[in-house]
Image: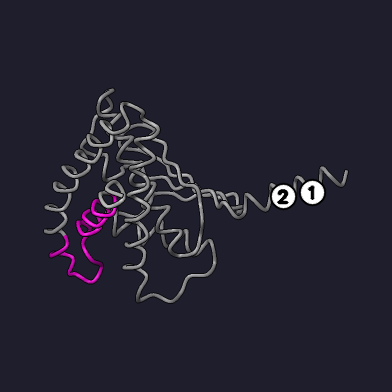
Amino acid sequence: TNLAAMESASSSRVTQMIPAATASRSYRRQRREVAESTFQFLHFEIVELYKRECKGDQKKMLAKIERIGVQVGSRLAERYTSTLPRLTEQLDIIKFICKEFWIEIFHKQADKLQTNYLGIYVLHDYKFAWLTRLSHNANELKEAQGIVALAAGIVRGALENIGIKAKVTCEILTIPRCQFTIVDTATMANDSTASTSARTSS
């Protein structure tokens, strides 16, 4: 219960650090400078806390950080889509994430979107804002893994709020370049069922 309360409090604080879309650009820039330094401190504290709690289990720690991101992403999607027409087409939702949502959260739109039109999307960010202050050494690469785990959770939470249940992973290519892979779990489940039925029939 204490852990759940802490995760909820952490997600609320991270959400509050991201300026509202209705604020003026200049005001949001000023808030963003303060918010980013506060975010970095909060993220560092979250990582250190989970390091101790998970006793060095990196996979477990990243899963907990991602879970906070999911809560944050859902709240942010609610905020940023409240005045928009409802998005129903999957590709339109992904494009919204790549453009408007990416700009609001990461200060620029994603640089490239690729898809196989079968429920898999790859979003490329050549200069991911949350990684620009890090270098490619071992210690900071570990820190970067925690940052992108939170970011992947935010994207996943936003998608779920808008209507897509997906698995979201992020691969760091060379800091600050990374790519997010979104796999629509419903589409993949349907494909798996179809493949099983085809094998059974044959």
Residue 38 locus on image (x, y percent): 14, 48
Q: Amino acid at mark 1?
A: Ser
Q: Which residues are magenta?
A: 7-28
Residue 19 locus on image (x, y percent): 21, 62
Which colour assignment does the render follow? Answer: one colour
**Quick one: which residue is furthest to the front in this view?**
1
Q: Which mark is residue 193?
A: 2
Q: Amino acid at mark 2?
A: Thr
Per the model, the C-alpha gap separating discs 2 and 1 is 6 Å
Residue 108 horizontal side relative to residue 111, left or right: left
Note whether 62 is above or below 183 in the view shown. Answer: above
Residue at 51%, 59% (x, y): give it. 164
Residue at 23%, 41% (x, y): give it. 46
Q: Are marks 2 and 1 in contact (CB under 8 Å)?
A: yes
Q: Quadrant of residue 50?
A: top left
Tell me the residue that label 1 is attached to: 197
